[in-house]
Image (cartoon, grey):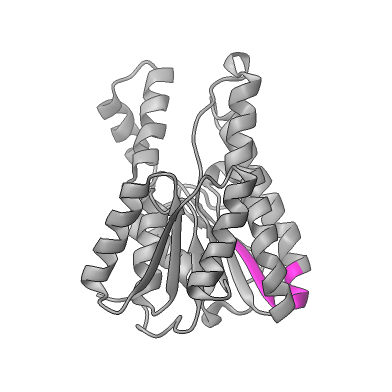
Amino acid sequence: MPVFANDALKGKHALITGATGGIGYETAVVLASMGASVTITGRREEKLKQLKNDVEKNVPDARMFPFAADIGNENDRKKLVETACDANGFISLLVNSAGVIGGGTVENLTQQEMENIMHINYTSAVLLSQLVYEKMREKKEGAIVNVSSLSGLRGTRGNTAYAASKFALIGFTHSMAVEAITHGVRVNAVCPGYVETEMGQAAIKNKAIRENRSFEDQLEISKNSIPSGRLTDPKEVAHTIAYLLTDAASNIVGESVKISGGNVLR
């Protein structure tokens, strides 16, 4: 059952990074069904083509533009924004969904690993936002949603590098939000816990290894630690992102919306 009207984002152009991952993928599906033109990007070109085909089967008049890019690369970022604008016009909506997991306990971290996680999860999102924000600021219109994590709100064992990158993204969200709203641009973040995606499964697997447990046992423990008793469906994250991009959320500014099944309540 559709949650939003099929014209809720008509006339808008959304750029979604990390569209080959679970949350980005579902967000693209939802925004296209709401009438937005959507530019999808990620490093896996075949997955982008698959997403375009999937959306167009369900939304025949969807305007989907796939562009493979590494947002960690300056030239790729510039080419992405330039090509997206040529294809679909002014980018009025930005979803920074690209991200990686990794790291470990402090004594096992390497500088290269920390810098890579920070670069993809934080620095690249800031630099891409900077490029897109230039036109948003000029037109006094736009909305940005950063995909952070519960790990951006509290630290956990063996999660130093990833949590640091997601905390940084929350700090960026708060600071940019108070600047951007004076130019008619809203910035918010979503903070999901464990999500039923490849990345979510990998995070549970990594924790199982650290705790010397089987994946199945760790998955059960993780579910039991959540008051709702289950992991989050990526569609639920996508719907939350979509709401934050609509005019219905016009006075929601600088928020970090938790999607945790009751796991984090402060």
Residue 74 position within the rendered picture, expressed as x and y whole percent measured from the top left: 64, 46
Q: Is residue 231 something that shows in the picture?
A: no
Residue 26 or residue 226, whichever sits in front: 26
Residue 69 position within the rendered picture, expressed as x and y whole percent measured from the top left: 49, 49
Residue 187, compared with residue 167, is above or below; it is below
Residue 220 or residue 39, whichever sits in front: 39
Q: Is residue 80 something that shows in the picture?
A: yes
**Residue occupying image coordinates x 73% and y 77%:** 138
Residue 153 or residue 130, whichever sits in front: 130
Residue 14, compared with residue 122, is above or below; it is below
Residue 157 position within the rendered picture, expressed as x and y whole percent measured from the top left: 54, 26
Residue span colored magenta: 180-189
Q: In the visual, does 130 lie left or right of 237?
A: right
Residue 172, compared with residue 177, is above or below; it is above
Q: In the visual, does 184 lie left or right of 9?
A: right
Q: Is residue 172 magenta?
A: no
Residue 203 position within the rendered picture, expressed as x and y whole percent measured from the top left: 41, 33
Q: In the visual, does 188 lie left or right of 228?
A: right
Q: In the visual, does 202 lie left or right of 189?
A: left
**Residue occupying image coordinates x 59% and y 32%:** 116
Q: Is residue 184 magenta?
A: yes
**Screen quadrant of the N terminus:** bottom left
